[in-house]
Amino acid sequence: MAELIATIAIASVTGLGVLHQRLYVRIHELDRRLDHTELTVAREYVAKTDLNDITERIESHMVRIENKLDKIIFK
């Protein structure tokens, strides 16, 4: 009876160890892929300074349009 319990315990511990290792490898792989994605996004998208310049240009055009509309409305 003790041999059966010992065998089951060893099998259970080994199984949990293998499961833990597989989960760890999977999490490590997902972490690596996320890091790669972050690096790709940082490299390929618009820089913050460029976005600020574009936003300022659009804002200045919108202000000019608003001023023209105000002139038309208040005449």
Image (spheres, helix red, strand yellow):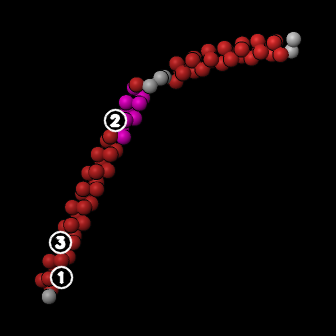
**Please, which residue is most extreme toward the left here?**
3
Q: Would you say the residues marked 1 and 2 are in contact, meaning their CB atoms lie under 8 Å apart?
A: no
Residue found 74% across the figure and 17% down from its top: 66
Check disc 1 and report its element: helix, strand or loop: helix
Residue found 12% across the figure and 83% down from its top: 3
In the rendered structure, the answer to whether residue 58 lies left or right of residue 18 reads right
Q: Would you say the residues marked 1 and 3 are in contact, meaning their CB atoms lie under 8 Å apart?
A: no
Main SS of residues in magenta: helix
Disc 2 marks which amino acid? His
Residue found 24% across the figure and 66% down from its top: 16
Residue found 39% across the figure and 26% down from its top: 43
**Please, which residue is most extreme toward the bottom here?**
1
Disc 3 marks which amino acid? Ala
Q: Is residue 12 above or below residue 21?
A: below
- The image quadrant of residue 11 is bottom left
Check disc 3 and report its element: helix, strand or loop: helix
Q: Earlier in the sequence, mark 1 or mark 3?
A: 1
How many marks are shown on the rendered structure?
3
Q: Is residue 18 magenta?
A: no
Residue 36 is tagged as 2
CA distance for labels 2 and 3: 37 Å
Magenta residues span 34-43
Check disc 2 and report its element: helix, strand or loop: helix
Residue at numbered disc 1: 5
Q: Is residue 36 magenta?
A: yes
Where residue 2 appears, x then y in whole percent?
15, 86
Q: Is residue 27 above or below residue 36?
A: below
Mark 3 nearby-residue class (10 Å; few <14, some 14–19, many ≥20): few
Q: Earlier in the sequence, mark 1 or mark 2?
A: 1
Residue 11 is tagged as 3
Disc 1 marks which amino acid? Ile
